[in-house]
Amino acid sequence: MGDISLIVIVVAVLALVYITSRIIRIVDEFERLVMLRFGRNLGTRGPGIVIVIPLIEQAILVDLRENFLDIPAQTAITQDNAPIAIDFLVYYRVTDPELSVLEVDDVVSASTNIATTTLRAVIGDIELDAVLSKRDQINETLRVKLDEITERWGLKITSVEIREIEPPREVQDAMNRQMTAERERRAAVTRASGEREAAILEAEGAKQSAVLRAEGAKQSAVLEAEGERQAQVLRAQGYSKALEAIFHEAQHVDDKTMLLQYFETLRDVGTSPSTKFVMPMEVTNLLQEFAGKISGRMDMDLGNGSSGESNGNTPHPATKSPQRLHPSNKDSE
């Protein structure tokens, strides 16, 4: 009897706890209760303590926090008939708890299904290259289309993120070959650009070198010309001083000295192996003058001899009177 009473007490306590938990509900800040009484909507309640009448009222808990739907890989056909597998994430939050309960049976399942069908519709209008290169544009398109559909369910699609795109094996091989060709092209362009820059730098260096050589040659020529000019000036100054000295000394030279100088010159000419000589007119004039002086000297000697005969001095028979030398014009020429 005692065991039965204990069991009854335990059952009564458990029933009381259950009924109490069903009657008194504690709603968090991020949750709301959609209340139905005899199937009629009473609105939302919470947060805090909410009293629910058992068997009369029904409370449906709705989470207002942002959640996400993990959409598994879906096969879609692109505009150019290329099959690709895409899996993505859909982030949403409930903005109207009543609509999320009253307008759709299971809002999560409905959102998942509408997301897969919308994905196929969007991918079907885009070519494969655009699908692979325009993820952000596809994400935004999916978000807008899903938000338009789920708005009547009290949901707000905050973001859509494509996680992975897997093209067919053949397309992957073609992409790999394309990337290899692109890398080779970039390498060739880089190599050609480097060679061009090197050639430009080399030509620029040669240009600067030629300019420097020309500048050096110019300066060298200027310096050489300046040195030659100074040398000529110095030679001219020396020659001028020599002429001045000669002129100064020549003022004190008489005709006899000049005649001796001409004789020395004639002696040097006579020792030359040449057969033709050019005699200046001054030499012939000096020779005429010299011949005249010799004739005068001989005349004086003859005069002295005549006076000796008259005095009884007979000249030796072997002595002959010299003939007077009168240089003719032909000789002088």
Image (cartoon, rainbow, N blue to C red):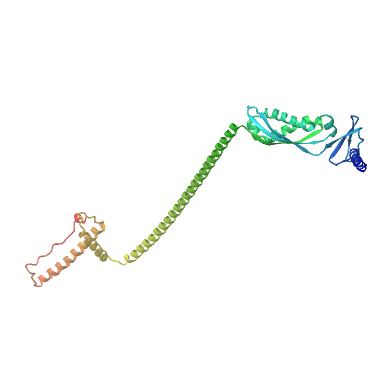
Depth order, front residue of 271/4 = 4
Q: Position of residue 109 (x, y in %)?
A: 77, 31
Depth order, front residue of 80/273 = 80
Would you say 298 lies left or right of 20 here?
Answer: left
**Residue projecting furthest to the left:** 317
Is 198 above or below relative to 308?
A: above
Q: Position of residue 56 (x, y in %)?
A: 92, 32
Q: How many marks?
A: 0
Is 266 above or below relative to 126?
A: below
Q: Quadrant of residue 110?
A: top right
Quadrant in which the N terminus is drawn = top right
Q: Position of residue 185 (x, y in %)?
A: 54, 38
Q: Quadrant of residue 105?
A: top right
Would you say 274 lies left or right of 93 here?
Answer: left
Would you say 277 lies left or right of 212 here?
Answer: left
Depth order, front residue of 73/243 = 73
Is 91 above or below relative to 263?
A: above
Quadrant in which the C terminus is drawn = bottom left
Would you say 233 lies left or right of 202 here?
Answer: left
